Image: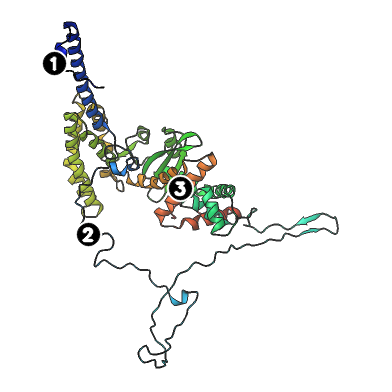
Amino acid sequence: MSLEITDDLIARQSPEAQAIIRLLLARIAEQDRRIARLEAELESLRKTPQNSSLPPSTQHPHARPASREAKSRRKRGGQPGHRKHERPLIRTEDCQAVVTLMPGGCRRCGTRLSGVDPEPLRHQVWELPEIKPVVTEYQRHRLSCPRCGESTCAELPAGVPRGQSGPRLIAFVATLMAHFRQSKRRTSLFVTSVLNIPCCPSLTVKHQRIATRALQPAYDRLVAALPSQPHLNGDESPTKEGTTKAWLWTFVAGTFTVFALRGSRAATAIGELLGEAFAGVMTCDRAKMYWRCGRLQWCWAHLKRDFQALVDHADPQVRRLGHDLMRPTRELFRQWSRCRDGTISRGELGRALAPVRHRVEALLLRGAFSGNPRLTGMSRELYDHRDWLWSFLDVDGVEPTNNAGERSLRHAVIWRKLSFGTQSPHGSRFVETLLSVIETCRQQDRNVLDFVTHAVTAHFRGETSPSLLPGP
């Protein structure tokens, strides 16, 4: 039951009660104003993918802001006049079977027809053959010596595995789990029901360990080549190994990528992989563990989201600096887009961004001396390390964003969401090795399954494994 407190109700009370009621009403009104102000500030501080490093997947699709672009009036699908996409015909001699079809008679009068059409209409139908595994039986005879009575058994030929799985099957199972993100149970189900090869989840674990050992030399060569790279993109993402928290690191070079799963986000992982020899430029976000690399390029896409957080703040002073920083940031991306598509050269980019650089640094200096605790720390850090904002203007091949690092992590993040991490160090080594192979093959336009197959074959034969480093 609600009771509305009116002036008439208060007047019927004793003077002491009236004083207490009026005091409490004043306090309630003050608390209501304070709650409203705090709720407004909390709303302005709410982190979203647009004003922080939160991934877009953390935001519900219905909660995302509406697009500012006008909705197209065109219908979905191909538009009138678009270029037709069709599968090209292969050569007739490459077909497994050619069926010649001759008309029986004239379609108008029925007269019997003869002759040959020099250019018949070609219609090709693609079909899967019946999948039947190839099983090779090796009969190892054991014979006894007539002289000493010792029995001797024939050895398996070089390259024949001791187990019942061949190199291509092992490579296929490893690729299905790592490249196509299938669980061990679904992988074994696919191998059994589609390929008609008996397989259980525990056998897929054996396959992944063999693939890891076969690919380890190629992975170690990539890690050894990291410190000599002139430029790297670095990023990391949380995951799990068993019940403990772990971090999946990625380092993207020009022609290859290295993943490493470690139990810490500390700079020790960078020291382990890059050592003290790395003298190149590291493109990254503003996480402090990357500072040990020496020369950095801070990602402007991250900075843009940080500036958007200032724009969304309730404090007018913070909001104004955010708007002032967003204007030169948009100009930076506009000029970089012109440089990337070849409209202007790197030298012209530097001249075009000279006033942008001066404006940004002046705004950061203003924020550093603003006296506002929301601005001073971030502005001073950016100003003190302002050279790390513009390394892309001085070093060819360096970009102002860390898109390469974040793109390389996309496949790994989807894998993590499906698998919930790894269960053992063996699984972690499999993940970091296969992810490195997959991303490097994508950069080099190589077939992942073929490379893994060659590596497993070389492993069984005791030969040198293939390399993922570009040749001389």
Closest to the camera, between mark 3 and mark 1, is 1
Disc 3 from disc 2: Cα separation = 40 Å
Closer to the chain start, of discs 2 and 1, is 1
Q: Residue at x 38, y 33 (%)?
A: 289
Residue 7 has which mark? Answer: 1
- Find residue 330 and report its horizontal and vertical position in percent: 20, 43
Query: Is 442 in front, or is 23?
Result: 23
Residue 354 located left or right of residue 284: left
- Find residue 356 and report its horizontal and vertical position in percent: 18, 41
Q: Secondary structure at mark 1?
A: helix
Q: Specify the amino acid type for callout 2.
A: Arg
The residue under label 2 is 74
Q: Specify the amino acid type for callout 3.
A: Leu
Disc 2 from disc 1: Cα separation = 63 Å
Examine the rendered structure and indicate whether residue 65 appears above or below residue 28.
below
Closer to the chain start, of discs 3 and 1, is 1
